[in-house]
Image: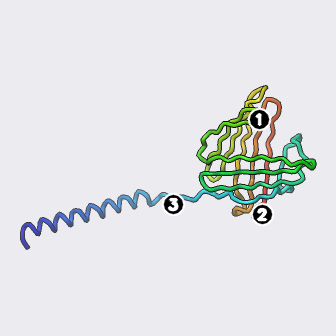
Amino acid sequence: MTPEREADVRLHTLRAASVAALLVVSAAATAGEPPAKPRPDFSGKWVLDQARTRLQPGFPGGIASGVVRIAHREPSFAFRRAFTRGGESELVAFTLTTDGKEVAGSESGMPTRSTLAWDGDALVYLLVYAAPRGEARNTVRYTLEDGGRTLVARESFKGPRLSYENVWVFAKAE
């Protein structure tokens, strides 16, 4: 073998060894990290489970039925809730992204700010009202339970005239 050919073989061997060492170091660095877990998908039709729902005493009751429909295609989250109370339908709907971006709006003539952001496997919705007597904040923490068959919404409302904590439970219908 010529001296030039020997030099080429040594250089090729050195490069191959360097690449192999880099791969070993990279594998060792990521070996302890679990693979990224996919985020829960909240999509579906959810029916209010009144037996498992816990409303704080004093919260306006009389809810005859409730249905929530969610279209969740990360990062888009479209929410529509219809409750029937006293023969009347109450609708709430919003579409937000799960990145925590604040969106300005209004509800019942009051300016609002809302966000939706991940906290682990939970989605946390925050709606802030600029009420005449001071700021009111409604925080709802959405989680999936029972292998994704149950939607739980833990609600905390704090306002200048009213405060309450509720746990809404919905069973997956679709």
Q: Extreme right residue here? A: 86
> What colouring method underlies this structural image?
rainbow
Which of the image's four quarters has the C terminus?
bottom right
Which residue is located at x 64 percent, y 57 percent? 40
Which residue is located at x 72 percent, y 60 percent? 44
Q: Can you tell which quarter of the image residue 105 is in?
A: top right
Which residue is located at x 47 percent, y 58 percent? 32
Q: Which disc number belongs to residue 35?
A: 3
Q: Secondary structure at mark 3?
A: loop
Mark 2 — residue?
173
Contact, mark 2 vs mark 1 (Cβ under 8 Å): no
Which residue is located at x 79 percent, y 29 percent? 160
Using the numbered discs, state the Cα–Cα distance from disc 2 to disc 1 in whole angstroms. Answer: 31 Å
Q: Secondary structure at mark 2?
A: loop
Mark 1 — residue?
158
Give whichever of 133, 145 is nearer the camera. 133
Q: Percent from the top left, x then y, of residue 164?
A: 81, 39
Q: Secondary structure at mark 1?
A: strand
* Badge 3 density bin: few <14, some 14–19, many ≥20, Cα 10 Å: few
